[in-house]
Amino acid sequence: MSDITVTKTRLFEGIWEGLVTRASGEGMPNIEVTHLEHPVRNTRLTAAPDGTGWVLRVPIPVETIADGVQTYLIRDKDTDEVLEIITLISGEVLADDIRAEMDLLRAELDMLKRAFRRHCIETM
């Protein structure tokens, strides 16, 4: 079990940023970021200016962005434990999911309206 914690701070201009801390405080963690089991190049881990840990900067490679769900794993290389997951969802898959959710919400709302009307009639 790793003593390393990764906390997302932002995703801006194609660069995912997070704060990496270590409970034991023992040196810089050995972090790896992968997409489909390939290392993400130009990933940087630098000391945080305030000394609270390290800043992890992961540039999302343009060639990995596509329709569907793209997953990037942040791992502790020493223990092979997944510390954080970056997920990007785009394209038609997302549109279909949102439409399905809206249809489900509409159906549930219609059911609640019928039940409420029936309740009002029964209690009059």
Image (tube, rainbow, N blue to C red):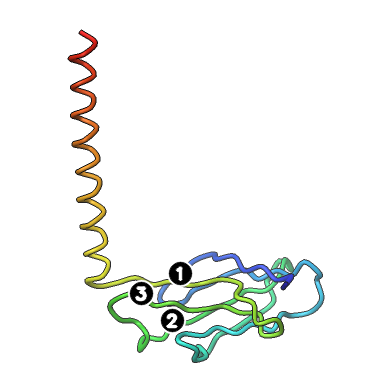
How many angstroms separate mark 3 from mark 1 (CA)? 16 Å
Say which of 116 and 58 sits in front: 116
Q: Which mark is residue 60?
A: 2
Label 3: which residue?
69
Tell me the distance, in whole angstroms, between the alpha carbons under discs 3 and 2.
14 Å
- Residue highlighted by disc 1: 11
Q: Residues within 10 Å of mark 1 (few under 14, many from 20)?
A: some
Is 58 left or right of 90, judged from the image as shown?
right
In which quadrant is the N terminus drawn?
bottom right
Q: Answer yes or no: do the residues labelled 1 and 2 have beta carbons within 8 Å?
A: yes
- Mark 3, residues whose alpha carbon is within 10 Å: few (<14), some, or many (≥20)? few
Can you give x and y, in whole percent of width and height, for residue 65 in the image? 34, 82
Q: Quadrant of residue 54?
A: bottom right
Q: Earlier in the sequence, mark 1 or mark 2?
A: 1
Comparing marks 3 and 1, which lies closer to the viewer?
3
Q: Is residue 73 left or right of residue 87?
A: right
Of the 4 image quadrants, the one containing the C terminus is top left
Check disc 3 and report its element: helix, strand or loop.
strand
Question: Element at badge 1?
Answer: strand
Residue beneath the point at 24% across and 19% down: 119
Residue 110, horizontal then vertical, whole percent: 18, 36
Nearest the eye: 58 or 101: 101
Front position in the image: 117 or 43: 117
Front-lying residue, 34 or 54: 34
Kindly give the residue lying farthest to the front in the view shown. Answer: 122
